């Protein structure tokens, strides 16, 4: 297994290119299942989660070709010969559930393993299932699998989401494109990745209105065609790298960055004393001379502060002047990075879904362990601000969501390297 070694850093300067969004790719790829014509996705990120989705689609009989060094994915689902998504692949990645809606819509049946470990526990898929039921799906949960059938095809229905779930909105949106009649998704998620999916589906011939708002209306069509679609910029990768100069000082340009992808996050960054400005090719970030001020953060569905940037923001606030209160409203138990940051000298008090972070003058390098994707990168950011060496173990989490993190950060002057554990 590999670790990442980071040494406390001076100011950063230069440019970092931002990749296509992992979370958009993971819903655009299963969209291939809706058509027997080719779907080509450009601006694809090179990540292990993309490989996992590739394996899942291939296990169903789809063709997935990786071109241009992984930047282009050429998908075709004309030869689907298996409607069962097996536990062995699904357990690796929760987004695997996104094959359910498309398979069911096009083939009238699907068997998909309930995702990872505790399926009806902390991260259930009940909202996905209720939405498909509202479109006439017959569902049976047995042996750890969802057995779904729609013998006469799905029909349009009204879905009132109890919570604006990203994945459930994506699954319902894809399924509704081939349902008979009109589907209305109320309290739909509004994330940019959903807008991206809707735009791609529209290129494939889907009739969709209202993406990016809380009500999406879909008029089902008989068939969808192929399309070529560039994947939207990864706003979480963007936010993560915006925090690097905020933590270390200096000025960095994020190529491809767009303010509207991260308005709430940028507001908080500015509140803490960091300047963010538009450049010709993206966004620039500069840390002022006055240091970082404490600021309170509450995660929320888009356009609120993204839960996927909470851990990284905490790393910044560990070095701020004053006490910040971070409230995590999307996931239970998403402060696993806090004890690791405390090993580096951070002062954090976690109680339920709230973390109080009191800034310290200096973080200190320490051996720490990545517990999940976003936590791992928050430890790298903290390491850049710390005195001495930080060794982040279990970095396989990082490979799921950040391509070339070491070379991207090195290119702006960070002291970071990947090493093989003895
Ligand atoms: C997606 C993102 C993930 C991000 C999250 C929230 C992908 C591949 N992943 O995950 O990076 O952190 O959005 O922005 O796009 N829930 C239910 N029942 C359900 C579905 C969800 O109770 O059927 C709960 C979850 O347990 C969680 C909350 O709703 O507490 C948010 O989940 P959701 O928006 O569905 O996130 P994902 O689509 O899994």
Image (spheres, helix red, strand yellow):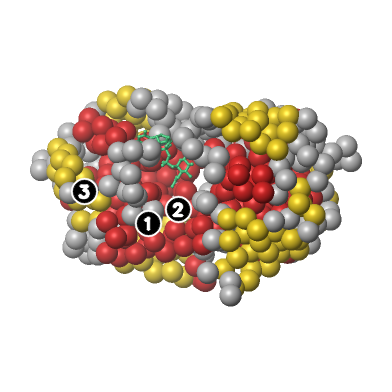
Q: CA distance from mark 1 to mark 2?
A: 16 Å
Element type where label 3 sits in the image:
strand
Element type where label 2 sits in the image:
helix
Marks 3 and 1, the one that precedes in the sequence:
1
**Which residue is the site of mark 3?**
145
Q: CA distance from mark 3 to mark 1?
A: 15 Å
Q: Residue at x 33, y 44 (%)?
A: 118
**Which residue is the site of mark 1?**
92
Marks 1 and 2, the one that precedes in the sequence:
2
Q: Quadrant of ligand 1?
A: top left
The reply to whether callout 1 and callout 2 are in contact (CB within 8 Å) is: no
Element type where label 1 sits in the image:
loop
The picture places residue 206, in percent across and down from the top left corner, at 33, 42
Marks 3 and 2, the one that precedes in the sequence:
2
Q: Residue at x 38, y 39 (%)?
A: 123
Rendering quarter of residue 305: top right
**Which residue is the site of mark 2?**
25
Rendering quarter of residue 183: top left
Rendering quarter of residue 383: bottom right
Residue 287 visible in the current orientation: yes
Closer to viewer: mark 3 or mark 2:
3
In this picture, residue 259 sits left or right of residue 216: right
The reply to whether callout 3 and callout 2 are in contact (CB within 8 Å) is: no
């Amino acid at each position: 297994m590999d670790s990442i070694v980071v040494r406390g850093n001076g100011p950063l300067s230069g440019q970092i290119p931002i990749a296509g969004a992992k979370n958009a790719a993971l819903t655009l790829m299963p969209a291939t299942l809706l058509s027997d014509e080719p779907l080509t996705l450009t601006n694809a990120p090179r990540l292990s989660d993309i490989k996992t989705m590739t394996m899942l689609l291939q296990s169903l009989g789809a063709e997935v070709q990786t071109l241009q060094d992984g930047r282009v994915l050429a998908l075709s689902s004309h030869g689907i010969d298996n409607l069962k998504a097996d536990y062995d692949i699904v357990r690796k990645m929760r987004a695997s559930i996104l094959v359910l809606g498309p398979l069911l819509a096009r083939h009238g049946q699907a068997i998909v393993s309930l995702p990872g470990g505790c399926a009806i526990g902390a991260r259930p898929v009940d909202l996905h299932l209720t939405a498909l039921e509202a479109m006439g799906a017959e569902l049976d949960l047995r042996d750890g699998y969802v057995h779904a059938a729609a013998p006469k095809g799905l029909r349009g229905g009204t879905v009132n989401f109890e919570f604006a779930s990203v994945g459930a909105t994506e699954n319902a949106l894809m399924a509704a494109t081939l349902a008979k009649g009109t589907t209305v998704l109320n309290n739909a998620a509004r994330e940019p990745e959903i807008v991206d999916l809707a735009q791609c589906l529209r290129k494939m011939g889907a009739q969709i209105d209202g993406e990016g708002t809380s009500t999406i209306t879909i008029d089902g069509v008989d068939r969808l065609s192929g399309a070529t679609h560039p994947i939207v910029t990864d706003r979480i990768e963007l936010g993560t790298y915006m925090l690097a100069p905020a933590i270390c000082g200096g000025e960095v340009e994020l190529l491809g960055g767009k303010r509207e992808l991260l308005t709430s996050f940028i507001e908080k960054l500015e509140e803490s004393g960091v300047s963010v400005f538009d450049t010709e090719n993206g966004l620039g970030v500069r840390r002022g001379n006055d240091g970082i001020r404490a600021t309170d953060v509450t995660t929320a569905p888009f356009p609120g502060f993204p839960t996927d940037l909470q851990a990284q923001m905490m790393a910044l606030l560990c070095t701020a002047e004053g006490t910040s209160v971070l409230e995590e409203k999307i996931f239970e138990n998403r402060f696993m990075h806090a004890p690791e940051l405390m090993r580096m000298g951070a002062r954090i008090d976690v109680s339920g879904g709230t973390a109080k972070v009191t800034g310290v003058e200096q973080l200190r390098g320490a051996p720490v362990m990545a517990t999940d994707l976003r936590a791992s990168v928050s430890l790298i950011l903290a390491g850049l601000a710390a005195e001495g060496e930080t060794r982040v173990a279990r970095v396989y989490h990082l490979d799921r969501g950040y391509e070339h993190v070491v070379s991207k950060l090195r290119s702006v002057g960070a002291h970071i390297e990947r090493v093989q554990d003895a």
